[in-house]
Image: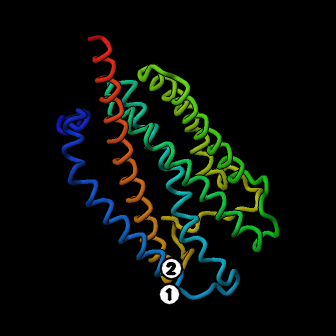
Amino acid sequence: MASLWEYANPLKFMRTTDWLLPVVAVAAVVTTATGLTWGFFFTPDDFRQESTVKIMFIHVPAAMMAINAWVMMLVASLVWLIRRHHVSALAAKAAAPIGLVMTLIGLLTGAVWGQPMWGTWWAWDPRLTSFLILLLFYLGYIALWSAIDDPDTGADLTAVLCLVGSVFAVLSRYAALFWNQGLHQGASLSVAPGTRMDWAYKAPLYISMVGFGLIFLALVLAGTRTEIRARRMKALVARERMV
């Protein structure tokens, strides 16, 4: 654990990510391309959903990362509130736009799938509604960072907002279990006994999920590095003005 906190040092973080970021980025491209190519071109059509089922190779990983991105922001925000490590606050800030894009992808691909399956582009289903609210929290989180000049104050307030928004991140994941009504089906992947999906779909889906996770990690590392550089630049400008 002591070695883990070393990466809260911006210099240590930058040195490590100098070599780690290219590795993660290449792995993300290869894994995502493999999963999507396999899923879209080498899996059979479903006997009910036909080719529409292949939307899940984008929808499921994007929706998963939309929720997990907020969880990562929550952990980073708690580290900031408890330990006051600036890298954690900057990592949470860098993750927000990525989580926002993943949420948008999840909503749009869900609508494309829902229209032929449900006969409507949108329904006020518990899971869909909580996912839409999560999107609004992402927008509010990003807007709050932009509206506050003092970085520490911004980190404090956005951390509190992240704590509140975590409720909807949980609801987005488990709404289908909390409420029985709604159009959205249960989880396609589960550790519960019983076969929910054939491995012809499951294998490329797992690869796509890993790929999206690596994409998120690569973008967070790149975004955090950018935030560190931007903060250094502001500090240098402020120092020059004082001189």
Q: Secondary structure at mark 1?
A: loop
Residue 100, given in percent of the width and then of the height, sits at 56, 48
Name which residue lies at 32% across and 15% down: 241
* Residue for point 56% across, 34% down: 141
Q: Quadrant of the N terminus?
A: top left
Percent x, y of residue 56 = 58, 70
Disc number for residue 25: none
Disc 1 marks which amino acid?
Answer: Phe
Q: Which residue is mark 2?
A: 39
The residue furthest right is: 119
**Residue type, mark 2 in image:** Gly
Q: Secondary structure at mark 2?
A: helix
Check the image and tell me how it is coloured: rainbow
| In-front residue for pair 148/86 | 148
In the rendered view, does 213 fall on the left or right side of 166? left
Name the residue that disc number 1 marks: 42
Q: Quadrant of residue 3?
A: top left
Label 1 neighbourhood size at 10 Å, few (<14), some (14-19), many (20+)? Answer: few
How many numbered badges does the structure rendering display? 2
- Judge from the rendering whether residue 225 lies leftward or rightward of residue 184; answer left or right: left
The residue that appears at 41% across and 21% down in the rendered structure is 152
Residue at the (41%, 30%) spot, across then down: 78
Badge 2 crowding class, 10 Å Cα cut-off, few under 14, some 14 to 19, many 20 or more, is: many
Q: CA distance from mark 1 to mark 2?
A: 6 Å
The percent coordinates of residue 217 (x first, y second) are 37, 53
Query: Are discs 1 and 2 less than 8 Å apart at CB?
Result: yes
